[in-house]
Image (cartoon, helix red, strand yellow):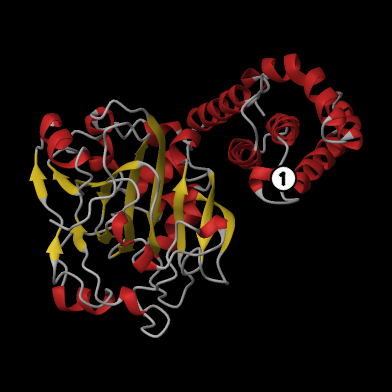
């Protein structure tokens, strides 16, 4: 490592260490962790790795919402100690991986130190004129993620659930005013496609370029879903680099298991990609507040099963095309929600293969659907059931807004 680069500075870690060690001992019973973390602070690399493994085990000891928050901060602490060691030794790839794991799995207390560490690593990579860690792969990875073109309607219909694109289509409105959006859709709880409102996003010009995506995010570690969808028994999650994820999207091996970066707070983690998107003004039309921004990146064939969400949703299609089917909240009973609390917002009905004997009321329900094209946004009201299928490699962004008084989400008929 060039000594002019210095080490990773962690002022928040230095300030908060005593409190974290006290809390993890008293609240989490982590006396052994506290001893390892104290040794790590004095430069014991092996102790730092052991402390990280201890915190990792605590994070996976039960459901995520049952993990004591102090263990998330403890994991961040251990990640910073390990990252500082790798950075001092010149292993930038491993440094970046450890810091990303701290961002994904850790708490918020030490986040500023982790983010500053990521910025410093990326700056060193840029100084070396090698912003992507695996340069050889970048040089071979040029071109487009997706080649735009007309879809073959007959082929598309073979992929979609029965009766798709044969009933009520979601209305398209070009350059919809905020007043019109609020009056005609938001307050009435009706979906709408908004076109010609994303042309000014940098992402529209950049995200279909593989060189760009690998340059700004290729070495970053991300959490992905592997398998048909989250309701299937073989579904699992993996941590891979963004370059590896892009390679899976590009893979022409149709027998490969689908990999989906779904409902991931990617833009909290990778600032360069966050700068490429703009929060639509429609997100503030109802007087609510933006709750979260999530990424939905994947190859053709990824499916989000029929489910509903509690928030207003502006779903922006940046690259590629998706099929979306929607049912109003008034049909919830006919869509047979799962009885388990964790899945109560998901339907038991598999739209691609409806079992008429198990779910007789679901077969002939009216619905709205559409093919969402590049540069279009879809407004999905709260509690509306929706099924989403990628027809091509696809990069999408969802903006969830808090529900506000005066908005209906339970309209009784499809208009």
Q: Is residue 41 placed above or below 370 in the rendered structure? A: above
Q: Which residue is mark 1?
A: 59
Viewer-proximal residue among 211 and 145: 145
**Place of residue 103 in the rendered image (x, y in percent of width and height, measured from the top left):** 59, 36
**Place of residue 343 in the rendered image (x, y in percent of width and height, measured from the top left):** 52, 59
At 33% from the left edge and 57% from the top edge, which residue is drawn? 385
The image quarter containing residue 88 is top right
**Place of residue 276 in the rendered image (x, y in percent of width and height, measured from the top left):** 32, 34
Left or right position of 281 against 268: left
Left or right position of 300 against 35: left
Q: Could you classify mark 1 by the number of other residues whose Cα lies within 10 Å: few (under 14), some (14-19), or many (20 or more)?
A: many
- Screen quadrant of the N terminus: top right
Q: Is residue 352 placed above or below 317 in the rendered structure? A: below
**Place of residue 67 in the rendered image (x, y in percent of width and height, measured from the top left):** 71, 42
At 32% from the left edge and 75% from the top edge, which residue is drawn? 361
The extreme bottom residue here reads: 357
Number of numbered callouts drawn: 1
Give the SS element for disc 1.
Answer: helix
Left or right position of 35 against 314: right
Q: Inspect this view and state whether residue 145 appears.
A: no
Viewer-proximal residue among 5 and 319: 319
Q: Inspect this view and state whether residue 368 appears.
A: yes
Viewer-proximal residue among 48 and 129: 48
The image quarter containing residue 300 is bottom left
The image quarter containing residue 314 is top left
- Screen quadrant of the C terminus: bottom left
Left or right position of 271 against 47: left
At 9% from the left edge and 45% from the top edge, which residue is drawn? 173
At 43% from the left edge and 55% from the top edge, which residue is drawn? 246
């Amino acid at each position: 490592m060039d000594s002019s680069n210095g080490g990773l500075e962690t002022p928040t870690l230095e300030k908060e260490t005593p409190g974290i060690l006290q809390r993890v001992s008293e609240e989490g019973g982590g006396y052994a962790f506290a001893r390892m973390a104290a040794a790590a602070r004095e430069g014991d690399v092996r102790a730092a790795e052991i402390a990280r493994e201890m915190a990792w085990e605590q994070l996976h000891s039960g459901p995520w919402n049952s993990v004591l928050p102090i263990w998330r901060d403890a994991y961040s602490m251990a990640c910073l100690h390990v990252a500082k060691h790798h950075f001092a030794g010149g292993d930038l790839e491993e440094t970046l991986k450890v810091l990303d794991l701290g961002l994904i799995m850790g708490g918020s207390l030490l986040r500023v130190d982790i983010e500053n560490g990521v910025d410093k690593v990326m700056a060193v990579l840029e100084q070396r004129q090698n912003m992507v860690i695996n340069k050889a792969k970048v040089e071979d990875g040029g071109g487009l993620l997706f080649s735009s073109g007309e879809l073959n309607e007959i082929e598309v219909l073979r992929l979609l659930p029965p009766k798709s694109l044969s009933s009520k289509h979601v209305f398209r409105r070009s350059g919809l005013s905020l007043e019109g959006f609020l009056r005609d859709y938001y307050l009435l709880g009706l979906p709408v496609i908004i076109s010609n409102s994303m042309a000014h996003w940098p992402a529209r010009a950049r995200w279909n370029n593989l060189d760009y995506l690998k340059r700004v995010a290729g070495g970053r570690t991300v959490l992905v879903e592997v398998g048909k969808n989250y309701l299937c028994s073989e579904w699992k999650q993996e941590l891979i680099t963004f370059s590896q994820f892009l390679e899976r999207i590009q893979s022409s091996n149709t027998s490969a298991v689908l990999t989906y970066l779904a409902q991931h707070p990617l833009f909290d983690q990778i600032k360069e990609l966050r700068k490429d998107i703009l929060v639509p003004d429609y997100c503030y039309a109802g007087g609510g507040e933006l709750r979260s921004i999530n990424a939905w990146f994947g190859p053709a064939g990824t499916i989000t099963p029929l489910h509903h969400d509690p928030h207003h949703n502006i779903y922006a299609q940046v690259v590629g095309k998706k099929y979306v089917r929607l049912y109003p909240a008034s049909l919830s009973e006919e869509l047979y929600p799962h009885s388990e609390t964790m899945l109560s917002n998901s339907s038991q009905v598999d739209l691609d293969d409806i079992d008429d004997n198990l779910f007789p009321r679901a077969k002939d329900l009216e619905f709205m659907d559409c093919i969402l094209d590049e540069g279009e946004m879809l407004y999905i009201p709260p509690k509306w059931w929706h099924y989403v299928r990628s027809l091509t490699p696809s990069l999408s962004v969802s903006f969830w807004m808090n529900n506000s008084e005066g908005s209906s989400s339970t309209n009784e008929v499809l208009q």
